[in-house]
Amino acid sequence: MSRVRVFIPQDAAALAVGAGQVVARIRAEALTRGLDIEIVRNGSRGMLWLEPLVEVELPQGRVGYGPMTAAEIPSLFDAGFLQGGSHPRGIGLVADHPWLTCQQRLTFARCGLTAPLSLDDYRAHGGLAGLAKALQMAPAAIIEEVTRSGLRGRGGAGFPTGIKWRTAAQTEADQRYIVCNADEGDSGTFADRMIMEGDPYLLIEGMVIAGLAVGATKGFVYIRSEYPHAFKTFVEAIRIAEAAGILGDDILGSGRVFHLEARLGAGAYICGEETSLLDSLEGKRGTVRKKPPLPAIQGLFGRPTIINNVLSLTAVPTILAMGGDFYQEFGMGRSRGTMPIQLAGNIKHGGLIERAFGLTLGELVEDLGGGTRTGRPIRAVQVGGPLGAYWPTSLFDTPFDYEAFAARGGMIGHGGIVVFDDTVDLAKQARFALEFCAIESCGKCTPCRIGSTRGVEVMDRILAGQDVVHQINLLQDLAEVMRDGSLCALGGLTPMPVMSALTHFPEDFDRAQSAQAAE
């Protein structure tokens, strides 16, 4: 009789809420009861409000129980969970959960299903099919497939990936590089971490394909220091991939070359900006470079360099395996394919949703997210990280689309959505944005370095009710200078949360003045 397999995530989000203790208690309880089980540490399914999620593999599928605590494990055994028995924490067949059945998982198709470091699991679930096709194609044909897919950078500006790759490929050089920006520092984002911890070979496959496309033989993955579990898992995945011939001097027996290294960042938000990241990789202090030249022409060590983030590169294997036309069928307008969207903050059902572009913001937050965790009304959401706009519920009809968001003064960024209920003070949030910029600025340009510090001082006077009208005018002038004069997006985008808060929630800025008048 085969052993029953029990799946418990080793994802950092699950570990943070006690997955390690749950595993230890299940092992101890099984030993005490004389039961022979196999525990598989998988990635997260993305239903973070149900973590730690325990799944048992049965003939009809995997049955889930969550969120579990170590103290509840004896009752789980008493309920016969190894046979799919009923328990108050039971959610039934995990694959049939409405949170998952409404999704269109392409990038995250394997995450939570497989053992992250098992190449057999990866292959059994479609892994390496894209690379196998790419090895049979000319470099220009790979780039054309990515271009036809409509894939755009899943980070800030949404720049077309195919154009970036073509630029690097056509630039004469003795060496080219592929750099993955895994410095996922935006508030409310965790998709990169989930992939690196739960499906690391997908990123490796995407980077090898990118190398084949542009003629690069070396790649680097720059992982934020706050992701120790992701770094450890990814380094081990590289070692296994090298041993299996997926990386190295003879990729899958093709004679093609691609080597990959993981590098750990040092906790600087500015190194999420591509040119600062390059400086850091070169062993320098991370500061923004002037552009031009673009990194695709003169990047790492002065050579043509492709810089994409994790979500961009992990979309590539699907595009090669299924074809650019297949991927292009998802989405709306110029926003093609699917987007992994992360729901965070004061949200009832926080986690990761992968859907085609076009779903409205309201559908994401209210329908899939279930509203606030506190049960209070939603007052604001911030999309696109700490430099994204604060939006009221009146904008919830906006489709999740690059152009639709830009038309209303927002940005999608890395797809993180942070939800706030009606107790939030948006003037204080505006101050936080300016303080964040002041702390994280590399200091290279004056508008960002000085403007953010002066902005904090102006906000302090507004919050204290000192000459509020004049201070708001000063704040608007300062925001204009930072937006137009900063060298990079850190200073250039800081006005977005500040001005959106002022535009949509003006009552929070004159509250102190109103209180003084009432006295």
Image: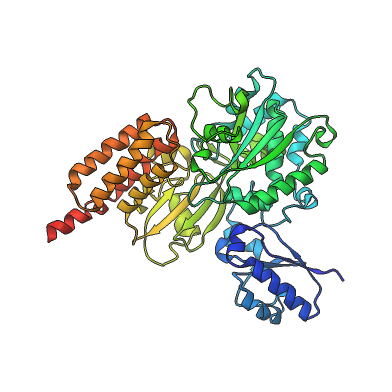
Q: Is residue 88 visible?
A: yes
Residue 421 position in % (x across, y down)? 38, 60
Residue at the (50%, 45%) spot, across then down: 358
State which quadrant residue 220 falls in: top right
On-image quarter of the C terminus? bottom left
**Is residue 329 visible in this depiction of the protein?**
no
Image quarter in which the N terminus is found: bottom right
Q: How far across and down, in percent of the image, does residue 199 sit?
A: 69, 50
Hey, which quadrant is residue 52 in on the image? bottom right
365 over 30 or under it: above or below: above
Q: Is residue 335 above or below residue 466?
A: above
x then y, percent, for residue 221: 64, 40
> Which residue is more in the foreground, 515 or 90?
515
Residue lying at the far right in this picture: please name it: 1
Q: Is residue 244 left or right of residue 341?
A: right
Give the residue displayed 71% in from the left and 46% down from the top: 235
Figure quadrant of residue 294? top right
Residue at x 69%, y 47% (from the top left corner): 234
Say if 232 sits above or below 406 in the image: below
Colouring of the image: rainbow
Seen as rendered, the residue at the extreme top is 172
**Spot occupied by residue 481 in the image (x, y as percentages of width and height):** 32, 32
Viewer-nearest residue: 472 or 128: 472
Q: In the visual, does 315 lie left or right of 500?
A: right
* Total marks in image: 0
Query: Residue at position x 43%, y 53% from top?
Result: 362
